[in-house]
Amino acid sequence: MDFTYEGGGRIQVQGNGSDFEIPHLAYEGDEGVLVGGCSGVEFIIFIRHRFSIGDIVYSLPKAQKGIMRRYTIKEVRVFPFQTDLSRVRRRGYPFAPLYVDTYNAYHNDDELASFSEAFAIAEAAIEAEAIAQEEFIRDLC
């Protein structure tokens, strides 16, 4: 394929049995050429949270009373209650996510724990209650 410049502002292309002309832009100056265009933009924002959808978690306030209350995470919401995390455009997001369980109850990040954490807290609460009961019975005698 041959490219030839013909001084009239056009480039002529010859090759493969076809000849055609391409308009040529000639520019002389010392400030440069500003070229623009359009393109699609996709924002990807990562927000870290402790539990994912489908995780089985336990209630910390109940565990502090010695009760193992189990929830399954159905949805993770970010303030102001957006389920589509790609619409959150704020850096350094200051709010913790809200977790929605299968009973449609809302839980904060600090109200939930994994099984091992909740079990350890519940076990300690039961032992503390047993010690308190023993002391109460001793005081009665």
Image (cartoon, rainbow, N blue to C red):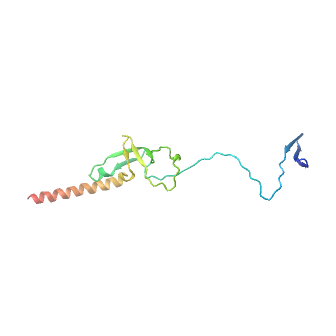
Residue 116 visible in image: yes
Q: Position of residue 105 (x, y in %)?
A: 36, 43
Q: Quadrant of residue 73?
A: top left
Q: Quadrant of residue 137?
A: bottom left
Q: Is residue 35 left or right of residue 76?
A: right
Q: Is residue 128 left or right of residue 56?
A: left
Q: Position of residue 3 (x, y in %)?
A: 88, 48
Q: Position of residue 36 (x, y in %)?
A: 71, 49
Q: Is residue 115 left or right of residue 94?
A: left
Residue found at x 77% / y 54%: 33
| Front residue (pair 8, 74) | 8
Q: Residue furthest left?
A: 141
| Front residue (pair 15, 124) | 15
Q: Position of residue 122 (x, y in %)?
A: 29, 53
Residue 53 visible in image: no
Quarter of the image containing the C terminus? bottom left
Residue found at x 74% / y 51%: 35
Placement of 32 over or under 3, stated as above or below: below
Badge count:
0
Q: Is residue 87 left or right of residue 12?
A: left
